[in-house]
Image: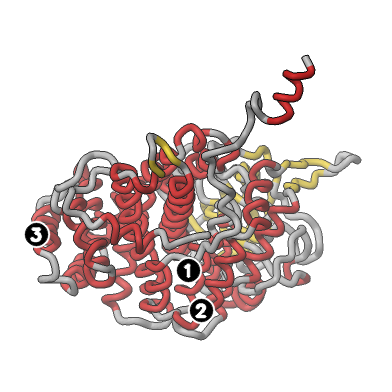
Amino acid sequence: MVSILAQEQSGQYATHDVTNQPPPLAPYDAAQDTALLEGLRREGAGWAEEDVRRLGLRAGSVQAQEWGEQANRHEPELRTHDRYGHRVDEVEFHPSWHHLMRVAVGEGLAAAPWADERPGAHVARTAGGLVWGHTEAGHGCPTSMTYAAVPVLRRQPELAKVYEPLLTSREYDPGLRVPTEKRGLLAGMGMTEKQGGSDVRTNTTTAWPTAEPGVYTLRGHKWFTSAPMCDVFLVLAQAPGGLSCFLVPRVLPDGSRNTFRIQRLKDKLGNRSNASSEPEFDGTVAWLVGPEGRGVKTIIEMVNCTRLDCVMSSATLMRKTLVEAGHHVRHRSAFGARLVDQPLMRNVLADLALESEAATTLTLRLAGAADRVVRGADGTETAFRRIATAVGKYWVTKRGPAFTAEALECLGGNGYVEDSGMPRHYREAPLLSIWEGSGNVNALDVLRALSREQGTAGALFAELASARGADARLDAAVVRLKDMLASGSEAGARRLVEQMALALQASLLVRHAPAAVADAFCATRLGGDWGHAFGTLPDTADVDGILERALPAQG
């Protein structure tokens, strides 16, 4: 008996020695992404590189990664009444949520670019989102809506004069108080209702004018209003003159609570750290933004901005899960060799790397267009931004779930358990295709833009023409795209938009990426030398060159 005990203590019968497992990824550098840094410089924000690199180190820190995990583990809680029975309609968040928000707002990832005169400020914000998003995705919702609210409020200058300086502040000041007494504000939006969803023209929430000019009272129920603890909301409601846009503060100027009854929080597939609610309006005080009956026209700029952030968030999720997969296979061995050295695994990783770089490059091109349009660019860039943002929103967000599933599979069973973080990323991926209009809504929006907004098709083909002659497969794809456009139908909208996105991504890579990346992308996505799953690159692909660029050496 003594002999057996001694053998157990010596390790001869030990059952839990940990071998062949990767070390923790954190700390790591979330900004160690060549495609991202090149795009940042190319799109006019090279001056922000030092800040982006600093933020990337912070995003990959043990502390920030822990904040992301805790914010999702300890979900927000709705408190409708206080202990005495008074209606309070407050949502309580874990401290980690506030830590994440404080950094995001402080680093200018909310509305700060609107107050920054430097060319490239909106690009710098997008690049910051691409690295800080490595923490967790949920808190990107209120920062995105706050960013998108500013150009809408500018439709009503007297409201913008009051609220814009607070929305563009880099001070995170949580808690419901009189907006003008706070150091910084967050904005949300309330558009969809249960009977119509994306078909907002069927909204039944009503708005009636009061004796005070520009002030209305609302009555109705919204179906999906995220981040209900924001300070102000842009809301659509039916006024006497038709569907209109309104500003709804949670706290009124006299300090009283506006009627904003939170009926419940949504029990969502993912995005668990972020509260999404169903608010009820009943005599809710609101200020008209833009003219009556022009609600969709007024709020559309908010949609354009948040769609860009959907593309950004999908690209971020791709990059984050690629980094996780690359780290795992570097340290895991099977069948006598490290996974990263096995040809088939290298093919999978290289294929994912192509998709990730294409998404990141397109995201930064869209951000560059947005920045130039804000600063008075010509009509061609405005038209390009309009069509390309909708195209990118459709395609990049559609690629997210399949990409994330493949990256998760690189970890095998380890990737299927919550501790790895990969299930959280996988649950997050579908949201970005749904938010701001699902795939069909975005595909049909592209058709609408092509038919109703002069110059959009010309702007897209002008962008593609800048890569003419660089790759025969891309040239052929552009010819096919023109043919498809001439005979396009509503039923074929997805196919058309997919081809637009692939041609646009290819044109960017041909111009700006190394030959290894551009050639493999064109061969597979345009030339048909590809399978139906990731990891089916042809033997001619320069896998080593792709991986060397995508996954730089880590400690």
Front-lying residue, 196 or 73: 73
User: Which residue appears at 23% of the width and 39% of the height?
Assistant: 532
Label 2: how many Cα within 10 Å (few below 14, some 14–19, many 20+): some
- Quadrant occupied by the N terminus: top right
CB under 8 Å between discs 3 and 2: no
Residue 186 visible to the viewer: yes
Q: Position of residue 496 (x, y in %)?
A: 20, 51
Q: Which residue is mark 1?
A: 127
Q: Tell me if residue 201 can be seen.
A: no
* Separation of marks 3 and 1 at Cα, in angstroms: 32 Å
416, above or below 316, in the image: above
Determine whether, in the image, residue 434 is placed left or right of residue 77. left
Residue type for callout 3: Ala
Answer whether labels 3 and 1 touch (C-beta < 8 Å): no
Name which residue type carries label 1.
Answer: Ala
How packed is label 1: few (under 14 Cα within 10 Å), some, or many (20 or more)? many
Q: Which residue is mark 3?
A: 476
Helix, strand or loop at label 1? It is helix
148 is higher (above) or lower (below) than 369: above
Depicted 83 relative to depicted 237: above or below: above
Depth check, front residue: 31 or 543: 543
Q: Which residue is mark 2?
A: 48
Q: Secondary structure at mark 3?
A: helix
